[in-house]
Amino acid sequence: MSSAPDLPQHLALVCSQFSRLAARRSGVGVGTVSWRVVSTIERYGPLRLSEIADRERVSRPTATAVIKRLEEEGLVQRAPDPTDSRSSLISTTPQGVAQLGAWRSQLALGVGGLLEDLPAEDVATLDRASQILARLVEAHDD
């Protein structure tokens, strides 16, 4: 258990490690970044490439490469931005939404296996912690 002064670093490290563990256990592997991007687009609606890069905290070239790959896979599509003729808006396709749902289900199964052997009190604690983390993300993810 970490002490309060170490909590920020410990929490960030453990969340990252748990995310990798969940991806390995679920068989979702390397596509996790791509699914995060599709999820962001689904959540916030059509976005410019620069907005995706900002939200995902990646460089524009990285966002460009991810979006290009997602377009080739038929998961996202570009449309002209009606407010700026130099830009495009990127949105999910019906195929992207369906595959995102399948990815989430696969992830839920993999993580569910990790949680099923925990005592009910620990599951309740993790549920509460996930709600707190979600609120923090929502409040500060701009």
Image (spheres, rainbow, N blue to C red):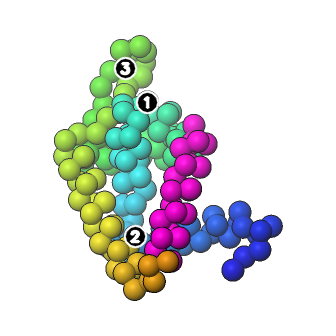
Magenta portion: prevailing SS class: helix
Residue 48, disc: 1
50 on left or right of 83:
right
Residue shown at the point (47%, 65%) measured from the top left: 127
Q: CA distance from mark 2 to mark 3?
A: 34 Å
In the rendered structure, are the residues bearing label 2 and label 1 in contact, judged by CB atoms less than 8 Å apart? Answer: no
Whether 101 is drawn above or below 123: the answer is: above
Residue 138, horizontal then vertical, whole percent: 53, 44
Query: Bounds of the magenta span?
Result: 122-142
Task: Work out whether mark 2 precedes mark 3 in sequence or the reverse, and give the earlier one.
Answer: 2
Whether 81 is drawn above or below 15: the answer is: above
Label 2 CA crowd tier, 10 Å (few <14, some 14–19, many 20+): some
Residue 125, horizontal then vertical, whole percent: 53, 70
Closer-to-camera residue (36/11) = 11
91 on left or right of 124:
left
Q: Is residue 80 magenta?
A: no
Amino acid at the residue labelled 3 = Asp
Residue shown at the point (57%, 37%) measured from the top left: 142
In the rendered structure, are the residues bearing label 3 and label 1 in contact, judged by CB atoms less than 8 Å apart? Answer: yes
Residue 71 in which image quadrant: top left
Task: Classify mark 1: helix, strand or loop.
Answer: loop
Task: Work out whether mark 3 precedes mark 1 in sequence or the reverse, and give the earlier one.
Answer: 1
